[in-house]
Image (tube, grey):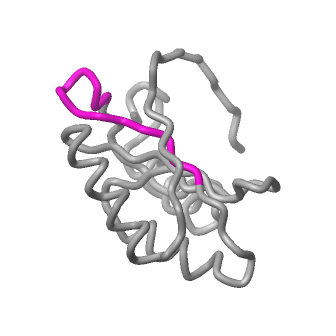
Amino acid sequence: MAQQLGIEEEQLLSKVSEFLERGILTRVGPFFNMDKSSGHVTLVAMIVPENQFDEVASIVNSYEEVAHNYRREHQFNMWFVLATESMDCAKELLAQIEKRTRLKVYNFPKEREFALDLFLEVR
């Protein structure tokens, strides 16, 4: 990354640390296309009572297969992506989440993928 940006590695690591501390970034790591590696990706929604939101988010986020958990201003107020080894594994984890949270999960498996080139300037 440093080479692509034309900066020293130490400078990159310093900026990444700063951005993580400031909440500009939430994580830095590889992005794997699970579909191309025989895995399964699905979008999941939940209707979470406001007084339970933090507790449910903590449960959902405890699964390493969960990414991109977002709060929305909508009846379906929690949305997250689940990336697993297989569709069966996804169904099993979603059943566990339902059991632990005592809330219904709505599974929206990916039917097709759209690639967007999005670049944001960060200062």
Where does the image place residue 77, in percent across and percent down from the top left? 71, 58
Q: Give the quadrant of the C terminus.
A: top right
Q: Quadrant of residue 118?
A: top right
Q: Nearer the viewer, residue 54 or 23?
A: 54
Q: Give the quadrant of the N terminus.
A: top left
Q: Quadrant of residue 109?
A: top left
Q: Nearer the viewer, residue 110 or 118?
A: 110
Where does the image place residue 86, in percent across and percent down from the top left? 20, 38
Where does the image place residue 11, in percent across and percent down from the top left? 47, 49
Query: In the rendered view, would you say 74 is above or below 63?
Result: above
Residue 106: in magenta span: no
Q: Residue at x 49, y 62 (%)?
A: 17
Left or right for 15, reference 31: right
Looking at the rendering, the stretch of residues picked out in magenta corresponds to 33-45
Q: Residue at x 65, y 75 (%)?
A: 53
Left or right for 16, reference 38: right
Residue 40: in magenta span: yes
Q: Residue at x 55, y 56 (%)?
A: 69
Numbered-mark total:
0
Q: Residue at x 28, y 25 (%)?
A: 35
